[in-house]
């Protein structure tokens, strides 16, 4: 069977954006209560308005990290916040600790101190729940040169690597199939046969595949380490365009030296200084 989802039709829509859930609904004491409307229509309108204006931020607070058995901090009191569906860029000298920070946010290592949370805000800009620990399952990461880690013999297997371990009925299978289709479409791989060897793809298409592998898990936050490194000018332009589209769907935190090409996408930027000290700073381009 040709391994392609491009020509299959799917009738059910699957939500793409996850919202953190919590049982703690205590409002911030600093926030005033919302106005009470006697008219029920106004109440409904007001509620609809509030829902559409809610938003989340990923919050890293005072994070420090030193690898076990070493004496030097690689990250020193790193704090920043990134609003959902925005594009954050961290730049700075080689060896300053940028990749180390991404690995902590992805949950590969635990910080020595500090916290990594998701905070929800209401339409009045006030936190409306207590912050929740960021669930690492909600975070995707694409390493530098991700194509070096491809293991499967065809594109489909590469994308769904790990699925056999997931048990579930038809509902789960349908959900995964829909996610697969959406991921493949999002990165523009629809014209490619999924039977193909991933290593036969061009450099730009390998990066698309690496992104699809993460998107199929439907992350809320996608971390990218040097997404343009090693690509020719055309592939770089393709990946930049793809990242612009992805920003509409999820939050992107990128580490890169390619400031000029990524600048049009960037909402927030920070410089990592040697010793793992992060400072908010406009891009120097
Ligand atoms: N487990 C470890 N033990 C000791 N030192 C480490 C460990 N992991 C990374 N380092 C060192 O920490 C420093 C920061 O590394 P990191 O890869 O985070 O930097 P970077 O800013 O991402 O660099 P680049 O831009 O070159 O990718 C480097 O000097 C690296 O050698």
Image: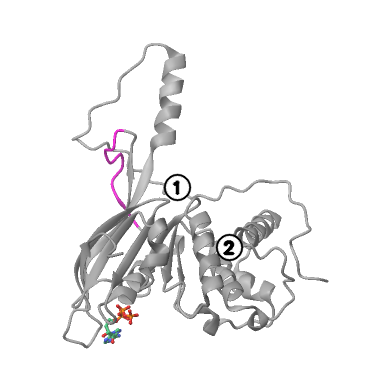
Q: Is mark 1 within 8 Å of ligand 1?
A: no
At x 26%, y 38%, the residue is: 126
The residues tagged by marks 2 and 1 sit, at their Cα atoms, a distance apart of 17 Å
Magenta residues, as a range?
124-133
Which numbered disc covers residue 38? none
Residue, disc 2: 216
**Circle 2 — which element?**
loop
User: Which of these two is toward me, 197 or 126?
Assistant: 197
Which numbered disc covers residue 19? 1
Q: Position of residue 128 (x, y in %)?
A: 30, 39
- Rendered view: 105 above or below 149: above
In the rendered view of the protein, which quadrant contains the N terminus? bottom right
Quadrant in the picture for residue 229: bottom left
User: Which of these two is toward me, 244 or 143?
Assistant: 244
Quadrant in the picture for residue 92: bottom left
Q: Position of residue 56 (x, y in %)?
A: 36, 47
- Rendered view: 59 above or below 26: below
Q: Is residue 1 left or right of residue 137?
A: right
Residue 11 appears anywhere in the view: yes
Q: Earlier in the sequence, mark 2 or mark 1?
A: 1
Q: Is mark 2 within 8 Å of ligand 1?
A: no
User: Which of these two is toward me, 222 or 157?
Assistant: 222
Query: Is residue 129 magenta-colored?
Result: yes
- The answer to whether the residue labelled 2 contacts the one labelled 1, judged by CB atoms less than 8 Å apart, is no
Q: Position of residue 135 (x, y in %)?
A: 40, 60
- Rendered view: 79 above or below 153: above
Query: Is residue 271 magenta-colored?
Result: no
Q: Position of residue 276 (x, y in %)?
A: 21, 74
Q: Nearer the viewer, mark 2 or mark 1?
A: 2
Badge 1: residue crowd in 10 Å (few <14, some 14–19, many ≥20): few
């Amino acid at each position: 069977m040709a391994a392609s989802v491009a020509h299959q039709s799917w009738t059910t829509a699957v939500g793409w954006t996850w919202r953190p859930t919590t049982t703690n609904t205590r409002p911030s004491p600093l926030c005033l209560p919302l106005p009470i409307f006697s008219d029920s229509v106004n109440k409904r309108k007001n509620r609809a308005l509030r829902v559409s204006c809610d938003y989340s931020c990923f919050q890293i607070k005072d994070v420090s990290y030193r690898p076990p058995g070493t004496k030097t901090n690689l990250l020193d009191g790193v704090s920043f916040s990134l609003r959902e569906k925005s594009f954050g860029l961290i730049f700075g000298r080689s060896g300053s600790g940028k990749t180390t920070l991404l690995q902590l946010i992805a949950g590969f290592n635990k910080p020595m101190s500090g916290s990594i949370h998701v905070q929800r805000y209401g339409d009045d800009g006030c936190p409306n729940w207590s912050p929740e620990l960021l669930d690492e399952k909600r975070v995707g990461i694409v390493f530098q040169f991700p194509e070096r880690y491809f293991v499967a013999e065809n594109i489909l297997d590469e994308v769904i690597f790990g699925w056999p371990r997931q048990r579930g009925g038809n509902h789960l299978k349908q959900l995964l199939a829909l996610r697969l289709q959406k991921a493949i479409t999002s990165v523009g791989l629809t014209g490619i046969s999924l039977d193909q060897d991933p290593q036969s793809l061009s450099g730009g298409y390998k990066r698309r595949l690496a992104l699809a592998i993460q998107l199929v898990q439907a992350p809320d936050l996608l971390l990218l380490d040097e997404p343009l490194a090693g690509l020719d000018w055309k592939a770089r332009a393709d990946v930049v365009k793809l990242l612009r589209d992805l920003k509409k769907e999820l939050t992107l935190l990128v580490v890169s030296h390619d400031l000029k090409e990524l600048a049009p996408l960037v909402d927030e930027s920070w410089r990592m200084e040697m010793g793992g000290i992060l400072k908010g700073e406009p891009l120097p381009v």
